[in-house]
Image (cartoon, grey):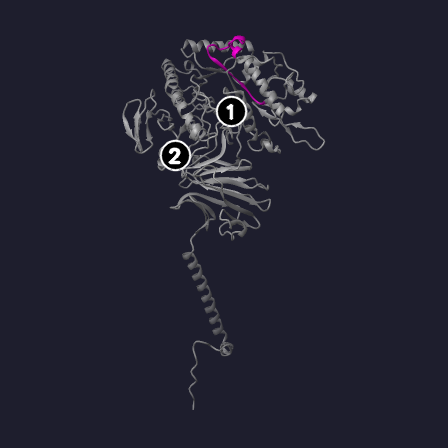
């Protein structure tokens, strides 16, 4: 008889029986079981991944402070800055050049104190985040430092423009406000001359960026880096490839209204009278003097007899050459050295300085009753007698920037181009050269009876332009910084052509030349430049001449002249290149007189009032609309209006042929009075199609 098999415990299969049965299976059954096992394995794997995706957050806190915290966003490999306690997004940084989508574990030695956190990609780079010591009470900042671990790594962090408007950084040829509208390839973050390199960065530049979320980004001064801007997408900071330098910057989340820190050493009043640029004959000293006196007589005849006549560098050179015969350098001391060089001539040995109180009586007045401004630069033509003698004698060899010599070899002057001529540039690392230059500038100012001295060519890095190594103290914008500090000792009548790390100095900054047209390289770029300069701390600037000084699409356009005039009326200085009686009719001449009077009576007192606030709080004098509406996205991109302090709004016309415009009135809860019509409007609103004839500029008082 057949017997029934014994029942077995189903919870456990004896290994030997299972193995024996598997051996006895046919090959097709074995294949089916194997496929089943593979399917089960993949199903479990997918399940685990799905569970992790559901359970694990795509963002991970890596460093948390009192007011904000840093997170790592998985997937795209980005650093996030969020404000606490609500976790509001403030900043997103796309990390480049490392496999950052899944960072490795933190280093224990870095994060144990809670104030630092590190990631390390062993073959690429190390990232260190740190809570920085507060720069001021109530502030909190985060340090970000990338260090390359091999020489071919390019460190690059990109700051998103999604839902963030950015301000600050460099000036550009076609200035936009905010920075989001600009476009620039990666290039050194160094000031430059836009007339020779319109695609580069301009003469006013700071390593400071402000986002509309209130966050600030400040780049370390001793770090060489590149900046690129992709319009409406992002701007990127990038370390130089092939070097061992870190990429280092500081992030400060919003805490209070953002502003540049206060560090002004002295102040000075804005000019109550305008500047008139001389464009007459310059063939000889006699012709220049006749031309200056003729301009002064015409200004007096047209009842514009107050102000400053500005003489350019070439005219200054010709006049200075007539002061004394050509010079012969005899060393670095006070006796026998030359006056400051311009590209055209070498000047004479000075006499004893003339006391400033006696200067007017001893020097013939060239432009009375007006004042005179002269122009110098730190360049010397290679054909000038002084430069040639310095090469032969070797006594003044250290006066010029030189290439780094090989061991045992003599230094070779670093030659560059300035206004079409091959020139050497003053060596600002030499104290003897600086004192020589400043002493001769003082003498020339006294000899010509000038009230103001303008210095061109302060911007730029001559070593970087020629791709040769620079001394450590002249890396980046070191040249501009050192020269500006020296020129500030000449007094409040000093004007320079560039600003970088020098906003604390009592210097006027000459704005870059603009095109004579309606584009962002012309009139439309004027207000963005005003806001940019003021945000970076350069509140006492001299705008380009009314109507622009570079040939544009519409030279000699009376409408352009009037609309330009209406803007500069509310700036620190009014400057003219073409006199109104040459460009336009009698109506424009009368309007010019009215604007000058309005500047003197209405604008100057305002500027004096808010210059005190600038010194005490660090707030800019000229402010964007978002200053009073910091949470209204509409205000973030307004670039054709500006505030003077908190109480006056200027909204001029910047479109050709228009006699109306939309005007945004900032500050919800405030009331604004139209000075033209006496009508009152609510703040936080937009006035649509607001009328502004050619004779009017909309100005509102809070």
State which mark lies toward you, 2 or 1.
1
Outermost residue, left direction? 679
Q: Residue at x 47, y 71 (%)?
A: 33
| Percent coordinates x, y for residue 521 in the rendering | 45, 28
Left of 99 or right of it: where is 83? left
Residue 411: image quadrant is top right
User: From what the image shows, is residue 213 above or below residue 272?
Assistant: below
Label 1: element kind: loop
The reply to whether residue 130 is visible in this rendering is yes
Which quadrant of the view contains residue 270?
top left
| Bounds of the magenta segment | 357-378
Locate the N terminus and report the quarter of the image it occupies: bottom left
Q: On the rendered image, what quadrant is the C terminus found in?
A: top left
Graded by Cα atoms within 10 Å as few (under 14), some (14 to 19) or many (20 or more), the crowding at tag 2 reads: some
Q: Out of 471 and 616, give the one closest to the viewer.
A: 616
Say left or right for 27 vs 392.
Answer: left
The earlier-in-sequence mark between 2 and 1 is 1
Q: Real-space Cα distance between discs 2 and 1?
A: 28 Å
Tag 2 residue: 637
Query: x, y percentage for residue 414?
Result: 63, 28
**Residue in the foreground of this view, choosing between 491 and 495:** 491
Mark 1 = which residue? 497
Q: Position of residue 644 (x, y in %)?
A: 38, 26
Work out which residue is located at the far right of the displayed protein and give it. Answer: 408
The residue depicted at 49 percent of the width and 71 percent of the height is: 31
Q: Residue 417: percent from the left, percent from the top? A: 59, 25
Residue 151 in the magenta stretch? The answer is: no
């Amino acid at each position: 008889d057949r017997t029934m098999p014994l029942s077995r415990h189903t919870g456990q299969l004896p290994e030997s029986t299972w193995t024996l049965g598997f051996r006895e299976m046919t090959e097709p059954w074995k294949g089916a079981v194997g496929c089943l096992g593979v399917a089960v394995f993949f199903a479990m794997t997918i399940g685990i991944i799905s569970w992790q995706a559901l359970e694990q957050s795509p963002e991970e806190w890596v460093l948390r402070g009192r007011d904000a915290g840093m997170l790592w966003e998985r997937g795209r490999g980005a650093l996030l800055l969020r404000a606490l306690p609500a976790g509001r997004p403030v900043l997103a940084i796309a990390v480049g050049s490392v496999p950052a989508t899944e960072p490795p574990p933190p280093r224990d030695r870095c994060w144990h104190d809670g104030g630092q956190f590190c990631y390390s990609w062993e073959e690429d780079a190390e990232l260190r985040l740190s809570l920085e010591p507060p720069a001021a009470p109530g502030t909190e900042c985060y340090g970000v430092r990338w260090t390359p671990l091999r020489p071919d790594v390019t460190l690059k962090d990109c700051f998103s423009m999604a839902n963030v408007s950015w301000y600050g950084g460099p000036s550009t040829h076609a200035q936009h406000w905010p920075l989001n509208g600009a476009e620039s390839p990666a290039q050194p973050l160094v000031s430059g001359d836009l007339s020779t390199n319109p695609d580069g960065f301009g003469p006013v530049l700071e390593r400071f960026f402000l986002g509309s979320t209130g966050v600030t980004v400040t780049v370390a001064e001793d770090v060489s880096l590149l900046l690129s801007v992709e319009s409406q997408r992002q701007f990127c900071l990038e370390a130089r490839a092939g070097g061992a330098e870190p990429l280092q910057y500081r992030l400060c989340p919003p805490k209070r209204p953002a502003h540049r820190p206060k560090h002004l050493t002295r102040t000075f009043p804005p000019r109550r009278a305008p500047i008139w640029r001389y464009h007459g004959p310059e063939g000889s000293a006699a012709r220049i003097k006749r031309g200056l006196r003729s301009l002064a007589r015409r200004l007096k005849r047209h009842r514009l007899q107050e102000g400053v006549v500005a003489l350019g560098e070439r005219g200054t050179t010709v006049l200075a050459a007539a002061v004394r015969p050509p010079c012969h350098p005899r060393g670095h001391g006070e006796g026998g050295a030359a006056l400051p060089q311009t590209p055209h001539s070498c000047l004479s040995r000075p006499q004893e300085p003339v006391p400033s109180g006696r200067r007017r009586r001893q020097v013939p007045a060239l432009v009375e009753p007006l004042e005179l401004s002269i122009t110098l630069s730190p360049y010397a033509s290679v054909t000038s007698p002084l430069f040639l003698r310095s090469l032969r004698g070797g006594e003044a060899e250290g006066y010029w920037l030189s290439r780094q010599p090989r061991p045992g070899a003599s230094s070779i002057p670093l030659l560059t181009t300035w206004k079409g001529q091959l020139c050497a540039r003053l060596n600002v690392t030499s104290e003897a050269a600086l004192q020589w230059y400043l002493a001769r500038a003082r003498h020339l100012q006294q000899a010509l009876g000038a009230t103001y001295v303008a210095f061109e060519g302060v911007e730029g890095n001559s070593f970087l332009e020629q791709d040769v190594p620079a001394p450590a103290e002249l890396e980046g914008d070191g040249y501009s910084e050192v020269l500006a500090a020296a020129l500030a000792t000449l007094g409040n009548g000093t004007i320079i052509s560039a600003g970088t790390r020098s906003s604390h100095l009592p210097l006027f900054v000459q704005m870059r030349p603009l095109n004579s047209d309606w584009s962002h390289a012309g009139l439309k770029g004027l207000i963005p430049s005003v806001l940019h300069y003021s945000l970076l701390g350069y509140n006492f600037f001299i705008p380009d001449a009314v109507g622009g000084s570079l040939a544009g699409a519409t030279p000699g356009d009376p409408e352009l002249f009037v609309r330009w005039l209406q803007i500069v009326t509310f700036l620190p200085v009014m400057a003219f290149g073409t006199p109104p009686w040459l460009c336009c009719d009698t109506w424009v001449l009368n309007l010019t007189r009215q604007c000058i009077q309005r500047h003197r009576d209405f604008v100057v007192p305002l500027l004096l009032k808010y210059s005190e606030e600038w010194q005490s709080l660090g707030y800019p004098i000229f402010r964007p609309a978002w200053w009073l509406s910091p949470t209204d996205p509409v205000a973030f991109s307004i670039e054709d209006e500006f505030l003077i302090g908190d109480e006056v709004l200027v909204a001029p016309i910047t479109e050709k042929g228009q006699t109306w415009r939309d005007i945004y009135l900032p500050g919800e809860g405030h009331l604004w009075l139209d000075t033209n019509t006496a009508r009152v409007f609510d703040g936080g609103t937009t006035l649509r199609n607001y009328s502004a004839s050619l004779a009017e500029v909309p100005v509102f008082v809070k």
